[in-house]
Image (tube, rainbow, N blue to C red):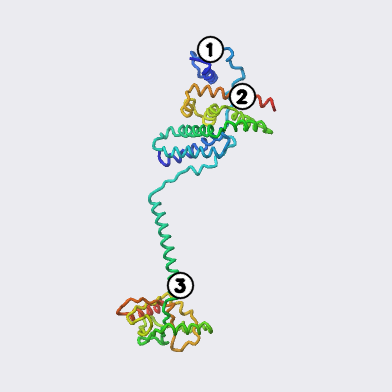
Amino acid sequence: MTLEDYNQCVIDYSKGVYRFVFKQINDSEKAKDIVQESFLKLWQKRKDVDVKKVKAYLFNTAYHKLIDDIRKDKYLEDETKIVDRGYHHQNPDVKDIINDALNTLPQIQKSVLLLRDGQGYSYNEIGEILNLSQQQVKVYIYRARVSVKEYIKDVNNII
Amino acid sequence: MISKENYQSYLLDRIEGVLSVKDNKELDKFLEQNPELIPLEDEYDNNIKIDDNYGVVYPNFDNLIRSERKLIPIIIKYTSIAAMITLLITFTILFFNNGKEKQQSIPIAKTIPKNLNENTNIELVEPTTIKREKTIINKSPKPIAKNKEKIEKIEANTLIKAKTKSELKDIHATDTIILIVNNLIEYVEVFEPKPKIDTMYIYTNWLCRYEKTPTKQPYQRIQNSIRGFLANK
C-alpha cells in the first residue's frame, strides 16, 4: 500500500469507521482515539495489507480496539445511563428512537447492525470483520431488528 | 441443520427471499416441531434501518492524512536550521566586534587638504588628540556640509599620498591600515566646529580599522581605499 493508497483510505473510510465506533460507545474522544489507533495500525502494517481488503481491515481493527476498550472501561455500565437518557427526548423522531434502540442492543448485535445498515456490508463481509460465521451474523441481525422493533413499539406506547 | 441457535438466520433468509426451497421446507418442519419459536406477525421489520450518519461528524480527519517525508526536504530543513544558527552566531560576533571595534579602534584622523591632488598628504593623528577634538565637537556641533560638498567635488582617481606617524602607539609604518569605505560616508555626518579652510578631518575610529599585518605597501592601500571612496562619491 502506497502513501497515496493510505491517504485515499483515510478519505474513504475514516468517517465511516468513526461513526461505527461512536455509535457504539457514544464517546467522541474515545471514538477518535480508536479511529486514530486503527489508522496508525494500518499505516504500520501497510506493506502487509491488501488494498482490496483495507476497509474490512480497518473496521476489524476498530472493532477489536472497541471491544478491548469496552472490556477495560466497562462501557456496558454506561450504556444503561445512555438508554435512560434516551427516553427523555421531548419530541423524539424516528431516528432518535432508533438510535436509542441501538444503545439497548448487546454489543455484537449493535456492531452487525451498524456494519449492515451503516456501511452496507454483506453478511459474509461482516462475518470476516467480526470473526463470525455468516449464519451467526444473520442470527444477530435478525435478533437486533426484532429488538429495535420491540423498542420502538414500547416507546410509542409511552409517548 | 436448523437448530434453536441458528433458525433465525433461516427466518432472515426467508424474509429476504433468498431461502432455497429445500431450506424453506426444513424451516417449516422445524417451526412445527418448535411452535414457541414461530415469529409473531409483526415481530420483524426489515425496513427499520440504523442511520449511522445521524448527528455524527468526524472532527479529526486531517490528523490522519500523512505526507511523504522526503530526504531532500529534511536536508533542506536541517540546512536551514544550520544556516540560521550560523547567521545568528555571525551577527552576534559582528555585533559585539562592532561595539568592540568602536571602543578599541585607534581613533586616527587624517587631514586631507582642501585641494586634493597627487601631492596631498593624509596625516594620521594620534588617538588622544582625536578624543580631545571629539569632545569639542560634541559641545558645539556644526555641520560640515561645505566639507562634504568639497569631498564630492574631488575627482575620482585623485592620487592621494598618505603617511603614518611612526611614533603612533601600537601602529607602525608597516601596519596595514584599511579604510572601510562604507563607513566613510558616516564621516560627512560628523560635525566639525571650526572647519579649516583647507583641511578636513576624517575620524578613523569610524572610518577605518587597522590590522597589524606587516606589509610593504601600507600607504598604497590607504590611497586606494580613499580613491575608491571618492570614486564612488
Same subunit, labels 3 and 1: the answer reads yes
Q: Is residue B184 visible?
A: no
- Which residue is rendered at x = 41% and y = 62% of the image? B86
* Percent position of residue A87, x then y: 66, 31
Does residue B92 appear in the picture of this structure?
yes
Give the residue at mark 3.
Answer: B99
Tell me which numbered mark, 3 or 1, is placed earlier along the sequence.
1
Tell me the distance, in whole angstroms, between the alpha carbons under discs 3 and 1.
Answer: 102 Å
Kindly identify which residue carries mark 1: B30
Tell me if residue B182 comes above or below residue B132 in the rendering.
Answer: above
Q: Chain of mark 2?
A: A
Q: Report x, y in % for residue B124.
A: 39, 84
**Disc 2 marks which amino acid?**
Lys
- Secondary element at tag 1: helix
The quarter in which the C terminus of chain A is drawn is: top right
Q: List x then y, in percent, for residue B211.
A: 36, 76
**Residue where numbered disc 2 is placed:** A149
